[in-house]
Amino acid sequence: MKKFLAVVLALMFIAIFSIVIVADVHAAGYIGAKKCRICHLKQFKAWEKTGMSDSFENLKAGVKVAEKKAAGLDDRDYTHDTACLKCHTTGYGKPGGFTSIEETPKLTGVQCEECHGPGSEYVKIMKKNKKYKIAEVKVAGLILPSENEKDCMVCHGADSPFTEKVDTKYKWVFKDRLEKTHKHFLLKHKH
Ligand code: HEC
Ligand code: HEC
Ligand code: HEC
Ligand code: HEC
């Protein structure tokens, strides 16, 4: 009986502990690229020129009809199609992320936070202290994309209708893609 109680207590402890951890990770919400623009104008401008910034447009009828056809997709309105939204918007299905074009019009396309993580918490640290330590912003949710290719493959992997099998122009080469995300600039401070 004592052993049983100990096991139950241990399980309860683990359960409570995991809730705390999960709650912590989920605390960060999406704020949208315009908020990052205030402090990172150069990266914003470079990103804005890529297809990621207006990627939502590609879900509209009459846009990229030939490319859709080659990938086996009819020409119709996909802007409310959940099968497409998860890859063509920011934070879809996550707390504070894109829900619909009507409710969250500022989170269309593949924005900063798709690669760098939801910003509400790490931005507070960047704002307060330009010489923040990299470990503190990471705990607050910042992601350095070059550290985990898997984060890209959620969208660039086999679930995408636009893979190398359709056209070699969609071939995934991690190193090349990292460079093409936006122009990169040296940071002023060591973190
Ligand atoms: C939420 C899904 C998603 C994630 C995560 C994602 N991408 Fe993408 N990416 C896209 C979509 C969609 C496009 C196509 C944009 C368009 O409609 O033309 C794209 C396009 C790109 C392009 C081409 C941009 C251009 O037009 O010049 C690069 C480079 C790229 N992604 C790199 C990456 C890297 C590197 C990662 C991981 C760090 C990543 N992506 C993660 C969805 C995603
Ligand atoms: C699993 C993620 C994923 C899903 C789901 C997804 N896409 Fe995409 N889509 C991508 C990625 C990644 C690219 C960019 C491919 C590249 O540049 O290598 C892309 C590119 C596109 C393009 C531009 C192709 C070009 O050559 O410029 C169109 C149009 C598009 N997607 C439409 C759709 C539609 C419509 C749906 C829903 C039926 C959809 N996508 C679902 C990830 C996805
Ligand atoms: C497709 C992925 C992707 C998107 C979207 C993206 N970034 Fe980045 N970002 C990177 C990569 C890759 C690096 C280089 C750091 C690394 O290797 O992990 C980086 C680095 C940075 C840096 C460090 C300095 C520099 O220029 O390298 C800043 C600041 C930054 N990004 C801001 C932004 C902002 C602001 C946006 C949105 C306007 C954005 N990023 C969108 C992938 C992305
Ligand atoms: C109030 C200003 C401010 C805002 C808003 C802001 N940042 Fe930053 N960010 C900074 C400062 C300051 C640095 C450090 C710059 C340096 O050392 O040159 C930084 C650094 C970064 C880095 C580099 C991380 C590293 O140390 O390698 C990334 C990536 C980044 N920010 C992404 C973002 C993203 C994404 C957003 C929006 C969600 C954002 N930032 C919003 C001020 C800001």
Image: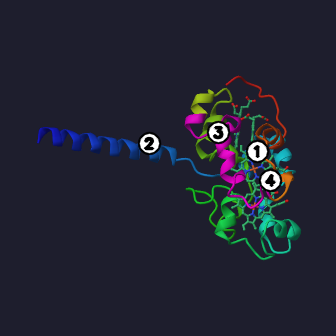
The answer to whether the beta carbon of the residue marked 3 is less than 8 Å from any atom of ligand 3 is yes
Magenta-highlighted residues: 138-165
Query: In which of the image's four quarters is ligand 4 placed?
Result: top right
**Where's residue 62, x and y in %?**
86, 74
The answer to whether the beta carbon of the residue marked 1 is less than 8 Å from any atom of ligand 4 is yes
Q: Give the labeled residue for mark 3.
A: 143
Count of numbered tags: 4
Which amino acid lies under the numbered mark 3 shown in the image of this protein?
Answer: Ile
Q: Callout 4: few (<14), some (14-19), or many (20+) C-alpha neighbours within 10 Å?
A: few
Q: Which mark is residue 21?
A: 2
Dot 4 falls on a residue whose secondary structure is loop
**Where's residue 134, x and y in %?**
63, 29
Residue depth check, mark 3 versus mark 4: number of the one nearer the observer: 4
Q: CA distance from mark 1 to mark 4?
A: 37 Å
Compare marks 4 and 2 and give the one earlier in the sequence. Answer: 2
Compare marks 3 and 4 and give the one earlier in the sequence. Answer: 3
Quarter of the image holding residue 93?
A: bottom right
